[in-house]
Amino acid sequence: MPTISIITVTYNAEKTLRRTVESVLQQAALKNIEYIIVDGASADSTLKQVEDLKSKIPNFKCVSERDKGLYDAMNKGLKLATGDYILFLNAGDVLYESATVEKILVQASAEKELPDVIYGETDIVDDKGQFISHRRLKAPEKLTWKSFKMGMLVSHQAFIAKREIAPSYDLQYRYSADVDWCIRCLKSAKNILNTHLTLCSYLSEGVTTANRKASLKERFSIMSNYYGYMPTLLRHMWFAVRFYTSKILGKQL
């Protein structure tokens, strides 16, 4: 089977890293996983937890040094990766079940040609790892680079790109470079595989949600760049109407 590089970016993540690491360690296809941790010179016990991994994961890499932010660290992870595929899993996020990676790689291997992009669904959990809900935006049956004009229909944690087509993250974006990255991956992709599986669970609060207004501005700029300013503006007006209508109807119910 092909191999996959799972990359986790950390900074003072002592409270959330363990569950992510455990979900990787539990994978039935552990021998097909290269696990990479890119740490931003944490001052808590994150690095002690990382040190314990060296004897547990056959193919493990770690770098700890100051960086210029989340996406700079992710670019470092891309440079360290040697797997056929790339998957970013944030501290606190977990793979859905112990057979998740095996199922992904088996499906990829069954294709006539290894897919350039593989995707699936995600669930949302709280800081204790408890299920909150399924992600509101459902992954489309067929995914193309144009799909993202309707929003980020596939979460970054359930978006797996072949390493050879994966570009560096554009550091002009501080909060939504992952949207731009996914679109660029899809524009380069010839074969795209929908696993029809829930691939991971992710924390409800992250860098993007904590900086929601700035993130939304960046997403609007990114979508305008790829899909045109006026079409993007009109779609966002419709998003706003739909959002507030659902709020009103929810209160009435």
Image: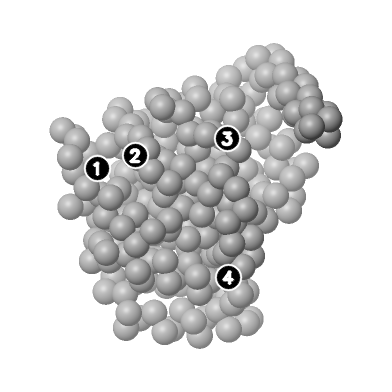
Q: Amino acid at mark 2?
A: Thr
Between the C-alphas of marks 2 and 1, the distance is 7 Å
Residue at 43 percent across and 72 percent down: it is: 22
Q: Is residue 240 above or below residue 127?
A: above
Residue at 30 percent across and 48 percent down: it is: 104
- Residue behind mark 2: 195
Residue nearest the viewer, comparing 26 with 61: 26
Judging from the image, what secondary structure is the residue with disc 3 in?
A: loop
Q: Earlier in the sequence, mark 4 or mark 1?
A: 4
Q: Earlier in the sequence, mark 3 or mark 4?
A: 4
Residue at 57 percent across and 64 percent down: it is: 129
Q: Position of residue 244 (x, y in %)?
A: 80, 28
- Between disc 3 and disc 4, the foreground one is 3
Would residue 132 be found to the left or right of residue 211 on screen?
Answer: left
Q: Earlier in the sequence, mark 2 or mark 1?
A: 1
- Residue behind mark 3: 137
Q: Earlier in the sequence, mark 2 or mark 4?
A: 4
Q: Residues within 10 Å of mark 4 (few under 14, many from 20)?
A: some
Residue 6 visible? The answer is yes
- Between disc 2 and disc 4, the foreground one is 2
Residue 74 visible? The answer is no
Q: Quadrant of the C terminus?
A: top right
Q: Residues within 10 Å of mark 3 (few under 14, many from 20)?
A: some
Q: Is residue 164 above or below residue 184?
A: below
Q: Earlier in the sequence, mark 1 or mark 3?
A: 1
- Residue behind mark 1: 107
Between the C-alphas of marks 3 and 2, the distance is 16 Å
* Residue 16, disc: 4
Residue at 50 percent across and 74 percent down: it is: 18
Q: Position of residue 156 (x, y in %)?
A: 50, 45
